[in-house]
Structures are given as structure tokens and as C-alpha cells.
Image: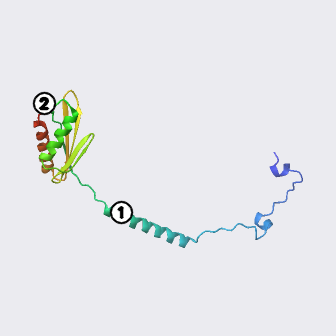
Amino acid sequence: MPAFRELREGATDAPLPWPRAALGRAARPEYHHLPMKRMVKRSRTRLLLVLAVSAMVLSSWNVARADFLYWAAPTLKTGSVKTGYSFAQTALRNQGARKLRVSANEVSGSIGRTYVAVTCIGTPQVTAVVMAVGPDGTETSRVRDAVSNAISKIVSFD
């Protein structure tokens, strides 16, 4: 089968001229790229800059190093989840919790170096889920037990 060039009208067997030679110097494409040394130097500078910024950002973060998580699920002496949250708030206040936060589905605060969060579940009986997180296992367990016992001893007549 003949080549495409031979099928064209007026085609010859002579090789086609090299495009650069045919177009002249002015029409040659110019490549504007940095020499390799400069490109590597800029890449190295950018890498060092990214590493320095990353180190500064990471060093300013306060990383939570909570090693212990304990939880308990005492049954409450009430029939209302809303009343269960008020029990949790009362128990945390009585245990000396700082930075007490109350939201629609959680009551939380800090006792010593332990963070305590209490949420309530409306099963047939209202159950409080007491979660304690802290760096010292003994203290965290003690705080969990104290809050759990305090919540379970509160009585409401509703």
C-alpha cells in the first residue's frame, strides 16, 4: 500500500526539508526554562521554607496527651432525659468541675486534670453515660466513679 505522501497530488520521493531550516531562525521556537542548577536551588529553598513553616505551626499546637478513658453508665432515678441532664450538671458542680459547659446533648467540665462528659439516653429507664479522659489513670478512674455515684444518688419526683 502506498504511503500517504505518495497519494497526494504532485508528491515526490524527495525528503521533506527539516522544519527549522525551512522556517528560518525567526520562526524557531524558543524554550524559556531555567537552567537545571537554578531550578534545583529554588526547589530546595521552597522545601526548606515549607519545612520551617510546618515546624512552627506544629510546635504551637497544644497536643492533648490523654492516655486513659473510663466510662460508666449509671441508671438514674427519673423518667425524663431533660431531668437527667440537670442531674449531670448538679453532680459536676458538686464535684468541683471547672469550665462547665451545657449543650442540648451533653454536660461537660474539668475536674483536676480530668475532662468529664455526661450524656443521657432515654431507654425505658434514663441512663447517664459518664466518660472521663485524663493523663493519670488513678485520678481519671476516681473522677469517673465520683461523678457516676453522685449522679445515681440524686432523686427527683417527677
Q: Nearer the viewer, residue 57 or 12?
A: 57
10 Å crowding of disc 1: few (<14), some (14-19), many (20+):
few
Task: Tell me the residue that label 2 is attached to.
Answer: 157
Which residue has dot 1 on it?
Answer: 57
Question: Cα distance, mark 2 to mark 1?
Answer: 53 Å
Q: Which mark is residue 127?
A: none
Residue type at mark 2? Phe
Q: Is residue 115 visible?
A: no
Task: Kindly state the secondary structure of the residue where label 2 is placed.
Answer: loop
Q: Image quadrant for the C terminus?
A: top left
Vertical placement of residue 156 versus 8, above or below: above
Look at the picture and state if 69 lies above or below 46.
above
Residue 33: quarter of image: bottom right
Q: Nearer the viewer, mark 2 or mark 1?
A: 2
Judge left or right: residue 3 versus residue 71: right
Please name the residue shown 42% across and 65% down the image: 50
Residue 69, horizontal then vertical, whole percent: 20, 46
Q: Residue at x 82, y 47 (%)?
A: 2
Residue at figure coordinates x 28%, y 59% from the top left: 62
List x then y, in percent, for residue 14.
Answer: 85, 59
